[in-house]
Amino acid sequence: MKNVLVVGAGYAGSVVAREMADAGRRVFVVDRRHHIAGNAYDEHDAHGVLVHRYGPHIFHTNAARIFEYLSRFTDWRPYEHRVRGIVNGRAYPFPINRDTLNQLYDLDLDEEGAAGFLEQAREPRDPVRTSEDVVLNSVGRDLYEKFFLNYTRKQWGLDPSELKAGVAARIPVRTNTDDRYFTDTFQAMPLHGYTRMFEAMLAHPNITVELGVHFEDVRGDFKRDHTIYTGPIDAYFGYRFGRLPYRSLRFEHEHLPGVHRYQETGTVNYPNDHDYTRITEFKHLTGQQHRGTSIVREYPQAEGDPYYPVPREENEALFKRYEELAKAERDVTFVGRLAQYRYYNMDQVVGAALAAARRLLY
Ligand code: FAD
Ligand code: UDP
């Protein structure tokens, strides 16, 4: 295999492109957007604040191998993300921890007391199949209704009982007072931003990048030995079996001149109020010094760019039918959050892309 076409310049496409280029292949990367980095794209807004155009991206992983791989292309700024959830107008640590319980119910529980409280509150479920099961089984109905039910309805347009367990299982419940959103070994932001990291990854004499190019417009034109496809899998096959649902978002960016700090933590979640799910203030994430600040509100919606696969049995069954078609395409590799229809974090996409490249090369 000498010539490779990569569709998509996000994590999946860029990592495979770099691996193939390092192995001596000629790689042509196209992306329909006018920038690289996929959904991790960041840029300076009109006021000079570094913002994430497609919502807040915080890098975290337990895999030293993946952190080291990306460290070839960037230095890092250590950053541990913290989130508050607003319930009845007050901000509580989220994920739920001992402080959340003590503040919410005006208690003074120690670790054991918090464990006992949750044991009393929980509604045991067996089996645990849905996101409703996960939350009721661990914290019970009151905390479910205060922090999870309405956020999930807003985010997905579905009740937690209609989503697989894995969605809510992303969120831990703690009896200690750790208020970090993630507890991974490696938690950091690329020192000069994600886009700069992607620029370094794609800066290779064997890689050519062309932006603003739709695969559909060029799919017959390119002479190639292999294609790496990282877009939505149903689109690749012309929606032959019908559309796979992907949840979308509208991002409302705002700059607040002269406001040094807008909120206490990087992100504040609004489970029960407003049409948006959360507000993120970027300076927390990036550590940037600036006289003003920039924030983003996320409004979930059905239509628009595909951002989230929707983890439900019926969607996964439809995905499997597309996956069968994909397996028969011997000269195409499908990789990434949209092509594999998996609710992947960034590090998991890097892992999947490295595995895909290895399979092609060895
Ligand atoms: P993408 O980044 O979607 O890249 C696919 C690329 O393919 C896109 O640039 C697209 O334009 C291009 N493309 C698609 N179809 C075509 C076509 N037909 N022709 C040409 N180009 C095409 N992960 C974390 O680890 N931490 C976080 O904090 C985090 N926060 C997130 C917040 C939000 C709001 C979202 C939506 C995701 C978040 N993620 C986070 C997940 C992360 O964005 C993804 O795991 C990762 O970016 C997926 O990379 P990818 O290459 O698979 O897909
Ligand atoms: N969730 C919730 N309340 C919150 C935060 C999250 O109910 O305050 C649920 C919701 O269903 C969400 C899921 O947990 O979709 C996963 O949240 P996470 O923050 O991991 O989502 P992402 O950052 O991927 O949007």
Image (tube, rainbow, N blue to C red):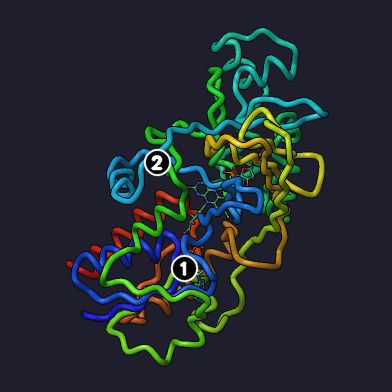
Mark before the other along the chain sequence, 2 or 1: 2
For label 2, being within 8 Å of ligand 1 is answered yes
Q: Element under label 2?
A: strand
Q: Residues within 10 Å of mark 2 (few under 14, many from 20)?
A: some
Residue that mark 1 sits on: 339
Q: Amino acid at mark 1?
A: Ala
| Label 1 beta carbon within 8 A of ligand 1 | yes
Q: Residue at coordinates 55% horizontally, 12% vertically from top-left?
A: 111
Q: Nearer the viewer, residue 333 or 186?
A: 186
Q: Ligand 2 appears in which quadrant?
A: top right
User: Can you give x and y, in whole percent of width and height, for residue 41 in the image?
Assistant: 52, 57
Residue 282, which numbered label?
A: none
Q: Amino acid at mark 2?
A: Thr
Secondary structure beneath dot 1 equals: loop
Residue drawn at the location 26% of the way across and 70% of the way down: 205
> Dot 1 surroundings within 10 Å: few (below 14), some, or many (20 or more)?
many
Q: Is residue 235 left or right of residue 354?
A: right
Q: What residue does disc 2 label?
A: 61
